[in-house]
Amino acid sequence: MAKISAMDIYKLLPKTNCKKCGEASCMAFATKLQNKKAMVEECPIMNAPKFEAKKKELVELLSPPVKEVWFGYDDKNHRATMGGDEVMYRYELTYYNPAPFGIDISDNLSDNEIKERAKYIENFVFERTGEKLTLDFIALRNASNDPEKFKNALQIIQENTKMPISLCSINPESIEEALKIINSKPLIYAATEDNFEKMLNVLLKHKKETNKEFALVLSSKQIKTLKGMAKECLNHGIDDLVLEPHTHPENISETLDKFIALRRSAIEKEDKLLGFPILGLPINTYFYTLNNNSISQFIEEPNKAAGIMEARTANTMLIRYADAIILHGCEIWELMPVLTLRQALYTDPRKPQAVDADIYPIGNPDADSPVIMTTNFSLTYYTVTGDFEKDGVKCWLIVLDTEGKAVDVAVAGGQYNGENAKNLIEEKGLADKVNHNVIILPGLGAPARGDIEEKTGWNCVVGTRDSSQVGDFLKKNWENILEKIGKNN
Amino acid sequence: INTYKGNIREVQFGRPKSEGGRGKVIKIGGQKALYRFEEPQPNNPVVTFDIFDVPMPGLPKNIRTYFEEVMHDPAEWAKLCVDKFGADMITMHHISTDPKLKDTSPRDAAKLMEDVLQAVDVPFVIGGSGDPSKDPKVLEACAEVAEGEKCLLASANLDLDYKKVADVAMKYDHNVLSWTIMDPNMAKDLNKKLIAHGLEGDRIVMDPTTCSLGYGSEFSINAMTRLRINGLKGDEFVNMPMSSGTTNAIGAREAWMVNPEWGDRQYRLPLWEITTGLSMLLSGVDIFMMLHPLSIAVLKEFGQTLTT
Ligand code: B12
Ligand code: SF4
């Protein structure tokens, strides 16, 4: 897809430079729009009737080839947003909305189990490099096929959490009942070839009577059928669509092929009827593995094997364009790698990987506290400070400017050196902060020790290899070190 | 369906018995398209099991359990990988040749190489210790005793005497792993230099460096994707098959660390390696150096669905 220029956007703006949008000129606003830093609505002039046609054209021009679809609550903190992508490969431009993860809840569970599981999903967090990685929605599954049970389960979830909800049932009656009490915008799974007409009727009726919004998943293993259903929905004014081309647990590559085909149609062929987010269902792999454990040689417990295979499917889907996924397994060891992969895939490839070089006080250090030297690679910095926080380490942390390189990389590359350390220590007046002259280095920094001692005049002690061991190390050794070599004067 | 001007080169490991070799032959690469639905992919992704010339006390316990009994004897170790876990290939890491470790001589490394070659009939990757001045000598000695077996010499890089590694490969009929740091231009540069030196392009496998999941795997994904796409577009200097040192994943603390808050390491560790490997597989990698038998089984199973 050809990238739109700021000029193309500017041409459609009012060109009055009235500054009501908060920008100095229409051209500046156009640049913001181009970079997705502003919305067309922020120019009030465009709302005048005489600009209506241009506004429509502009919105069309700016809309990404994969539509952005959200569900959940009105306030932005309780929403799941998917899609919005513009490129096939992440090195071209950053991918847009990190794919939301949903965990299923079966309506066959007891009331209490439903509540517990919902709470667990809402509170789940895995913290990594200063970011909290969390789950995004609850997929309420109508396993009973009973509309009343479905409704009851929904009630319990709504009362206990504010998670966005996907209503999963192919029974139009269940959906109809649930829609009566839902108090957020749901993602409805699914309209299929078999239930299409009935489902559509239920939804159109709901829309007409309540004017409430919903997003709809279209499910079929045929891309052609998906396209036909999308067209039909658009004709009826249902345009928050999501595509689910079936997850085949027994041959996951087949599914991935379809994901690729869908995304190519949207981005390379600009097919508007297929320009919607893709939903993947690793949960199918989970249940398939329970009865077909292909790794029983290594892992006998069916639910653990299922978790591993489900994560495998989830990972391949994330790499191959899934914009949202639904999982069943929710143990931390399973979710950690999948969440980390998502974090990696959606980091902006152009974002700097470094924090500011400085001497940071960690946990209210005083003049007797240790001085520890690390690098300004953000991954290193956040790992180290995270460990220190957990272990209650008090120290002065020298964060050396290694051009954003990890310890061993910077040692190998020569940025973790004495000269560099000396400048920072002098500039920040480390000598005035403490009354000893010891710096603790990471194990991997050992090769640079001689150089650092020589240039800075401070004594260096090589600590542990991993920062998670520093708390213990200090408890055992810091007093001794101070005693022996550390005291000034 | 897209069409591509170029194709990926095919590289062969091992020599068949009919030609006086030890037996198994493995081929990688040879793709004419990015995806299997555009053009069937000719060769399965291949996994080569890492083994070491010292018992590796640093390996996490739940990997050691599989190999504990054979770790003192690389020949037995190789046999176990082949007989019990169906290894396609074996990577023999001569890490004790490191001057900072035992400084084992190239001659002793070559002796060990002969033993492991005898023990199994699969092709080998031959690795040094990473010491830039010692590695070319170790590789030369090992390449000589494995003459004609079309092993993969790991590795040639810009920091060492890559010309010597290339010479050795040509003289004793082996392939060369061309290793660079996640920069597609560097990979191209090194390949160009190797080819200019006389090494045939069909003897090169590229290693653009595998960062572990969570430790920059996205950089590896980018580099590999670009290399593969450029190769298919017809760039003759980057259309080699690719290799991944997936074992790196096990070095990530999220994999090895015992931490009750992170759940059981028995599942977490292999899954970290699996996830790293899958990311590389879907970015175009053809051959994987891996360690945990479960990770290997899962990756291979998935890899096979990509070619059928
Ligand atoms: C990603 C990577 C790169 C990336 C860099 C990304 C970055 N921003 O740093 C790139 C591609 C740029 C790169 C380049 C190079 N790399 Co590199 N790279 C790696 C890799 C794969 C991961 C490094 C990483 O992210 N570690 C994670 C961070 C969090 O670890 P960390 O900073 O060390 O912090 C930990 C500990 O040190 C400790 N810690 C930190 N602070 C403190 C403080 C105290 C007091 C204590 C006690 C502990 C402690 O706790 C932290 C958490 O565990 C490693 C291999 C590996 N380790 O898996 C190779 C590796 C480090 N690279 C290596 C090399 C040789 C290089 C190059 C020199 C290659 C070349 N010839 O060009 C260049 C140098 C570039 C430069 N500096 O100019 C070698 C180093 C070998 C050596 N030790 O001599 C390695 C080990 C690969 C290998 N096996 O050969 N690399
Ligand atoms: S509010 Fe609209 S018309 Fe006024 S400067 Fe901004 S873009 Fe131009």
Image (tube, rainbow, N blue to C red):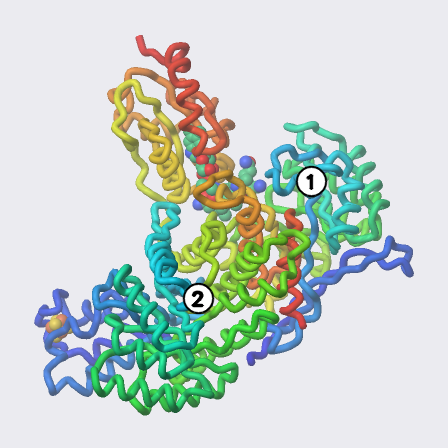
Give me the residue at 51% from left, 78% from top. Answer: A261
Which circle marks residue A326 in the picture?
A: 2
In the image, residue B210 lies at what x, y percent? 56, 51
Q: Residue visible at 48% across and 58% down?
A: A329
Q: Residue at x 52, y 69 (%)?
A: A284
Judging depth in this view, the residue of A94 and B135 nearest the camera is A94
Q: Are marks 2 and 1 in contact (CB under 8 Å)?
A: no
Q: Is residue A308 above or below residue A396?
A: below
Look at the numbered disc 1 and say if its residue's Cβ is closer than 8 Å to ligand 1. Answer: no
Question: What x and y, as percent, mark residue A376?
Answer: 37, 39
Q: Quadrant of the N terminus of chain A?
A: bottom left
Q: Chain of mark 1?
A: B
Amino acid bearing label 2: Ile
User: Residue A47: percent from the left, percent from the top?
Assistant: 12, 80
Residue at left 81%, top 49%? B172
Disc 1 crowd, CA 10 A, few/some/many (<14, 14-19, 20+): many
Q: CA distance from mark 2 to mark 1?
A: 44 Å
Determine crowd level at label 2: few under 14, some 14-19, many 20+ residues with C-alpha closer than 10 A: many
Left/right placement of residue A286 relative to residue A398 reads right
- Measured along the vertical axis of the image, is residue A225 above or below residue A83? below
Question: Residue A11 at x, y = what percent?
Answer: 21, 80
Residue A481 vertical placement versus B234 (above, below):
above
Identify which residue, A329 or B242, lies in the foreground: A329
- Mark 2, chain letter? A
Identify the mark at residue B128; answer none if there is no mark: 1
Q: Amino acid at mark 1?
A: Gly
